[in-house]
Image (cartoon, rainbow, N blue to C red):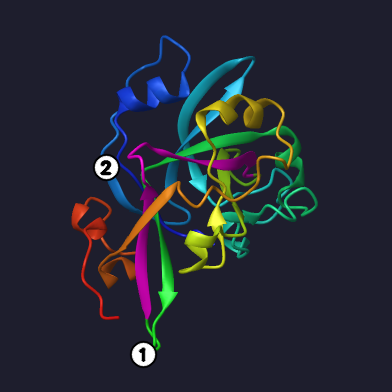
Amino acid sequence: MCGRFTNKLTWEEIVALYRLRKPVPPHNLPPRYNICPTDPVDVVTEHDGKRDFGPMRWGLVPYWWSKPLKELRAATFNTRAETVADKPFFRRAFRRTRCLIPASGYYEWQDTAGGGKQPWYFTRRDGEPLTFAGLWDEWKNTATGETLKSCTMIITEPNGFVAEVHDRMPVILEPQDFATWLNEGGKTLLRPAGNDVLQRWPVSQRVNSSRAPADDPSLIEPIAVSA
């Protein structure tokens, strides 16, 4: 799974990469180095051929959920590519409401010989942003009448490079795939990225805690680890 990622893209980079509708009010986008499930995340959607950008809860709440949000204990921040079209939580969103999730990199954890977990930071080898394939939905809180937009990230089997650390990876879309995913969907894009797309390095175990400060850039600095 992918349960933590970073986003340090500027507003200008977001507008250019995703070709957002204009005029678009500028957003203040501080760098975030420890984005966790249930946090708000920045998401790109498309309506009538025009792309919008805004925050959503990371952890999908399906439109039909009838209980209080605190009773939703399922881990819905990821969904598997192999089953996304059939799972009740995600199948409607897969057919109707797809999105793009911008990122700069993401973390995965590797079991160590001593029984601990060593975090690794993955980012693009070419220095470009990452874009994850996502789904979104809108839920109404019947008690308050408020609506909540939420999203999930689609994960797939790893390529050979990622498999050295972890058994899953996010679906990474290339710019030429954005329109196809947003408008047509389908499972053909839900495949592992090529072995030459990503790079990785070990980082401090401080990021093992979801309470590590999101504004701390040292979380992604490489460290030395014993063989």
- Residue 104 image point, x, y percent: 36, 44
Circle 2 or circle 1, nearest the eye: 1
Q: Is residue 4 above or below residue 42?
A: below
Q: Is 137 in the magenta?
A: yes
Residue at 80 percent of width and 52 percent of height: 86
For label 1, the crowd category at 10 Å Cα-Cα, with few meaning under 14, some 14 to 19 and many 20 or more, is few
Reading the image, the residue beneath label 2 is 31
User: Mark 1 or mark 2, which is nearer the start of the sequence?
Assistant: 2
Residue 130 sits in which quadrant? top left
Assign the C terminus to one quadrant of the image: bottom left
User: Where's residue 145, x and y in %?
Assistant: 61, 38
Residue 160's place in the image compared with 116, above or below, is: above
Residue 136 - label: none
Q: Would residue 32 be found to the left or right of residue 71 on screen?
A: left
Which residue, given by chain and number where applicable, does mark 1 sit on? 114
Q: Is residue 72 magenta?
A: no
Direction from residue 79 to residue 173 in the image, left or right: left
Q: CA distance from mark 2 to mark 1?
A: 33 Å
Q: Residue at x 50, y 23 (%)?
A: 52
For residue 114, what is the image quadrant? bottom left
Tell me the chief SS of the magenta region.
Answer: strand
Kindly tell me whether residue 27 is visible in this rendering: no
Q: Residue at x 39, y 82 (%)?
A: 112
Q: Quadrant of the N terminus?
A: bottom right
In the displayed structure, 139 sits above or below 203; it is above
Residue sitting at x 24%, y 59%: 219
* Residue 141 image point, x, y percent: 62, 44
- Residue 140: tell me if it is visible: yes
Secondary structure under badge 1? loop
Q: Nearer the viewer, residue 144 or 203?
A: 203
Residue 58 image position (x, y, % from top left)? 50, 49
Question: Which residues are drawn in magenta?
Answer: 117-141
